[in-house]
Amino acid sequence: MENENMETEDMEVGNEISEEARRYEEDLEMEDPPPVSLGKGTDTGGTALIYIGPSFPGAKRYTVYTGGLPEALEEKIEAAPIFRGLVVPVERLAGANVELSRSGSGLSILYQKAQETLAGREG
């Protein structure tokens, strides 16, 4: 019986985290997004952007971009839009880092999903 209760609680927590991630992704869509290019070589509009997601070949975590995003990152955003949420204006870096450090926050969930995507375990 106790195991069933623990499994139910785990499922409820998982559902709450998934719901928070969904709301966060909706908020990203509703916000005035920074001028991030989804087309190759397009300018960022002069806004300094920083990638706060996990590093992968062609995009290193905490790299600042001012003249457009690297092709590898743009391709990753096109293939898996969750990476879009991990590109933020530099002036939002401190707040983004606080949110990344909070387990279950929208950004920490996006980061985790990005890691899973890079590891080939899309989920």
Image (cartoon, rainbow, N blue to C red):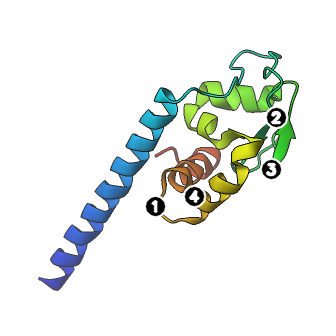
Q: Earlier in the sequence, mark 4 or mark 2?
A: 2
Q: Residue at x 82, y 18 (%)?
A: 43
Give the amino acid type for the residue marked by disc 2 in the picture: Ala
Please report whichever mark, 4 or 3, sits nearer to the chain's N-terminal start. Answer: 3
The image shows residue 52, relative to residue 74, as above or below, that is below
Label 1 element class: loop
Residue 62, numbered label: 3
Q: Residues within 10 Å of mark 2 (few under 14, many from 20)?
A: some
Q: Residue at x 65, y 42 (%)?
A: 86
N-terminal-most mark, 3 or 1: 3
Residue lying farthest to the right in this orientation = 67
Q: Give the Cα distance between marks 4 and 3.
A: 15 Å
Q: Amino acid at mark 1?
A: Gly
Could you tell me how far apart the alpha carbons at marks 3 and 1 are, in whole angstroms? 21 Å
Name which residue type carries label 4.
Glu
The residue identified by callout 1 is: 104
- Up-down relation of residue 97 to residue 51 (above or below): below
In the rendering, which numbered label is found on residue 99?
4
- Is residue 51 visible in the rendered image? The answer is no
The spot of residue 90 in percent (x, y) is 77, 43
